[in-house]
Amino acid sequence: MKLKLINFLIGGFAFAVACFSQSSIANTCVGKFPNPITDICWECMYPITIASTTLISDGQEDTPNPSEALCTCGNPPTVGVPVSFWEPMRRVEVVRQPFCMVSLGGVDLGVGVNAPAAGNHTNDDGTTTAFYQVHWYIDPLLFYLQAVLDDKCLDNEGFDMSYPTELDPLWNDDEGTRLVNPDLYLFLNIPASAACAADCVTATAGFPSNTLYWCAGCQGDLYPLDGNVSAAIGGVETSMLLAERMTAKLQREGLMAAASGPDGMCGYYPQIIMDKTNYKYQMLYPIPQTAQIAGKCCQPLGRTTVLWGAGKEFPYIGEDFVYEVFRKRNCCQGAF
C-alpha cells in the first residue's frame, strides 16, 4: 500500500512538473505596450533648430544643419525656412521567441512558419555567439499629433509591423546575406575589426565615424547584416547591435530612406551605405530609458552600454528588448 502511495505521489509530482514546464514554455512571450507619454524620452527630439537658430537643445547632441535663412523646393514649389530635429519614427524589438510581439503586450503570433529561435553558444575559446529575431515597426509618434500639427516635415505613415525577420531567409544565413552586403569580404580580417575600437571611442564621445562604416562602435562589427552575433557579451549590448544592423540592412535594401542634410530638405532619399550619425536609440523595454544619465536618455549608434545599460537585463521578462529609433530630419518648412 505504501509503495502504491509513493508511486502515486511520484507520478503526481512528475505530472505537475510537466504541466508547469509546458505552461512556462507556452508563456515565454511576455511584454507590454509602450506608453507614449511616460515611456518616451521626448528630449531625444532635441535640438530643434530653425535656420541657424537653436530653439531648444536641453544639452542634447546634434549633427550639422543647413544654416541658410531660406530654402526652396521644386515639387511642389515651396519657399520656406530650414528646420531640424530628431524624429521618433521607428520601433525595433529584439526577441528570443519567433513571432513574439513584445511591444504589442507579449502577443504570440506563431503562424506555423519554421523560424529559428534565439540561442547562445559558448565556443571552446570562451567566446559566446548569439542569435535573435528582430521586428521592425513603423512608429511615427509625432504624426499621431497631426490633428494639432499638420506638418509635411513629419513621417506620415500609419503604425505597422513592417519587417519581421522570421520571414527573411537571409537573417540566419551568413553566406546568403553577402548578397545584400558583398563589401563584407573587405572587412573579414583582424585589422578591420580592430579599427572598430576607434569607432567606439568616437561614438562614446559624440557620434560614430562614417569612415569606419563597417563598425558599430562599442557593439563591434556592423557586418554581416543578419542576426548572427559572433562575440556576444550580454543581452543589452547584443540587442543594441542587432537594432543597429537592422537599420543598416533596411537602408541597404532600399526599404528605408535618409532624411538629413541638404538632400533631405525637400524629401526622403535612398542611402545604400547608412550615415551612422543619423540615428539615436532609446530603450523602451524591459525598462524604459527615461532617466537621464549625463543629461541624456538616448544614444547614437555604437555608444557604450556600460552607463545606461546596467540593470536592464534580468530573467524571464527582461530578456527581450525594444528600442525607439529617432532619425535626424532636415526639412524645408514651407512658408508659402
Image (cartoon, rainbow, N blue to C red):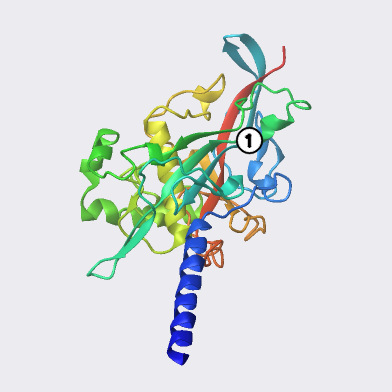
Question: Which image quarter holds the C terminus?
Answer: top right
Residue that sits furthest to the right in the current view: 148
The residue that appears at 64% across and 45% down in the rendered structure is 44
**Residue 79 seen in the figure:** yes
| Towards the viewer: 258 or 79 | 258
Establish if 40 lies above or below 158.
below
Q: Secondary structure at mark 1?
A: strand
125 or 102, nearer to the observer: 102
Tell me: residue 267, above or below residue 56. above
| Place of residue 46 in the rendered image (x, y in percent of width and height, measured from the top left) | 66, 42
Using residue 116 as the reference point, say whether residue 39 is left or right of it.
right
Identified at 51% across, 51% down, the residue is: 206
Q: Which quadrant holds residue 183?
A: top left
**Residue neighbourhood size for the residue with mark 1, other residues' Cα within 10 Å, grouped as few (<14), some (14–19), many (≥20):** many
Left or right of 164 on screen, residue 76: right
Q: Position of residue 279 (x, y in %)?
A: 52, 41
Q: Mark 1 belongs to which amino acid?
A: Phe
The relative height of residue 11 versus residue 64 in the rendered view (above or below) is below
Tell me which residue sits at (62%, 56%) in the image: 289
For image coordinates 42% across by 51% down, the residue present is 241
Q: Horizontal and vertical percent for residue 187?
A: 24, 46
